[in-house]
Image: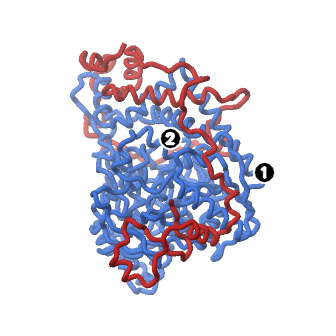
Amino acid sequence: MNHLMGSISGATAHLKQKALSSYELCEAVIKRHEAITKLNPFITSTHKLARESASRSTERYKKGKPISPLDGIPIAIKDNFCTAGIPTTCGSKMLQNYTPPYSATVVQRLIEAGAVIIGKSNLDEFGMGSGTIDSTAGPSRNIYRSGINYKLQSTVRYPTSGLEDGDWYVTGGSSGGSAVAVAAGAAFGAVGSDTGGSVRNPASYCGVVGLKPSYGIVPRYGLISLVNSMDVPGLFGRNVDDVATLLSVVAGEDLRDSTSVPSNLQNLQLPEVPSIEGLVVGIPREYHSAGMSQEVVDIWTKIAGLMKEQGAQVREVSMPHTQYSIICYSILNPCEVASNFTRYTGVEYGLRNESGHSMEAMYALTRSTGLSEVVRGRILAGNYFLLRENKERYFNQALKVRRLISQDFEQAWSSGIDLLLTPVTLSTAIRYSEFVKTDNRSQTADQDICTQSANMAGVPAINVPVALNLDGLPLSMQLMAPWGHDASLLSTAKWIEQHVNFPRLCTIED
Amino acid sequence: MSVTNLGRAFITNTHTTTKMNLLRVKRIPAIITQRNLNVCMSVFGSDSQSLVPQKPVVRTTSTGRPNLPPKTVVDLRLVRHLEKLSLVDFGNREGIAVLEAAISQADQLSVIDTEGVEPMISVLENRCVPLSEDKVNEETLSDEVLACSHTLVDEYFVVPPGNITHTQEKEYHTNLNLT
């Protein structure tokens, strides 16, 4: 069904005109999900609940009373957001049997807007990873070159066939399930979480728009914590307007999250035809890091040139602490994890290993059984960095370097720069066979280089797909803006989208 | 040569083009040449070369440890200590190698001069975040909360006896082959 690859506003228009009903749209999405199961986008499908939700939406449209621009629209939710009555596993054995009694703020707001929750999407366990490989539900696969038949909206012919040796491309992570669900038409939009790049990385590999909003403007209540000072609920869509619609629904203070702040994004409307006349775009030189593929550098160069030609002022800027951001993250992340993960004991929820005869034994055995090597590795590293003899040298030093990284951004903004333009990932999507050659810890250290700093500073950042390479894989660009400037970030992203003519996935054989 | 296609130039992927495809296509795909590359790039501005650094600017992989502290070796004492604090185990020798690599990477921060720099705890430090009212919330959620646990006695969570130190089986630490 062609509607499935269109925009949210396009779908809503069809629903309003009664060209199709919310129920039919939901059925089409369910059918698409069945056609792409080999990509493994979902840990839990919520088809029954989705149908009920879609039926209620159909009634509202019949009466001419849709609640919002999202009424009847199928949305996927990453499986680290609590959904009342629906299993929420974080891709981990520890929470395999956990059904939350409450829903995350983001989920509640989407439901209140009439959105249809279509499934809980796959992720690297607890959000730790950059491939969506390390989940108890198995890996997710990228739609591109997966062997599923699809067509591109392009006069140029790109390869779309599956890889000859049966290998496949990773979705990126950790929100890979959400990214591929949107890319493949099994959802119109999706929610993910971004701590070091976990929305933008899979958005880049899967050729969709991925937004990490400013820290604090989308409440984290109900998002199962990874790194409290960096976690941000993020949004996926096939175009920037869709992501803006989602943001307008989920943004805004929630008193149950003490790190959430008020926002005026509820009425967000992007200009029809954004302009970049006079916009000052910074190119941070240090973002060209070793290992970046030539085609990524080329596309960065081209987009910078395009923006300059069309009226923006483009200039190089130095952000000297960029190279330390990933190291800083590799300390602060495990430290917060070590603290956050003390909650997993098997007492109040989750897996419980009863073979120990003491409380401490029970906790230790439960945690060793329920948490993967990757997770345990981070807890142990975090506790190492927090040891009395190490805390000053590692944890406090990392906190100070965090300030230096944040100051790099402040200095860029005060020098007159409105937005920063950088790559997102070092290359296009990686083959699974290549990806697994590197361990999880090193892999994230390599892959998060361009994305991580935005989480350090709390600034908003967005991934915009701009082209396909010769292998038919998406190439994307990242924009970053000062904290709170999500609207102008989205406007400029929309401008890029309108000027690059990204060859969209337009049909998939069901 | 890697060329990405943004304009209407036709580029062929020589790995997948076959004779059959060439006959079907109306416009003959161009072979990748420097001229095509320039045509592509000129669509977006030929003087864009200088805007983006064309070579890597920083070294992201360290080749040695010149000014860094000596490499930390994880010994049995440290393993036991961390396992006790974390209540998770390293599992095997690889787990220890991962920690050693993490410490090695973290050591790279020690070269940065942070004299006079305040630690940054939160990016919202300059904003007022709300304090909640000192008001009793009337809702009781005990049923919902207790329902999440699989081991209850009446309305109590249950744990085995405390104050007993958990020790791993002896072979586990021997198998780690540590000093």
* Shown colour of chain B: red
The residue that disc 1 covers is A415
Residue B98: mark: none
> At numbered mark 2, what does the secondary structure look like: helix, strand or loop?
loop
Is A139 or A14 nearer to us in this picture?
A139
Q: Is residue B53 visible?
A: yes
Viewed as shown, does residue A217 lie left or right of A282? left
N-terminal-most mark, 2 or 1: 2
For the C terminus of chain A, the quadrant is bottom left
Residue B114, by quadrant, is top right
Is A370 or A378 nearer to us in this picture?
A378
Q: CA distance from mark 2 to mark 1?
A: 31 Å
Spot occupied by residue A3 in the image (x, y as percentages of width and height): 40, 78
Residue A218, by quadrant, is bottom right
Mark 2 or 1, closer to the camera:
1
Please determine whether, in this image, residue A353 is positioned above or below residue A192: above
Is A260 or B42 nearer to us in this picture?
B42
Name the image colouring: by chain
User: Extreme left residue here?
Assistant: A355
* Shown colour of chain A: blue
Residue drawn at 23 percent across, 22 percent down: A357
Residue drawn at 42 percent across, 19 percent down: B74
The residue that disc 2 covers is A227
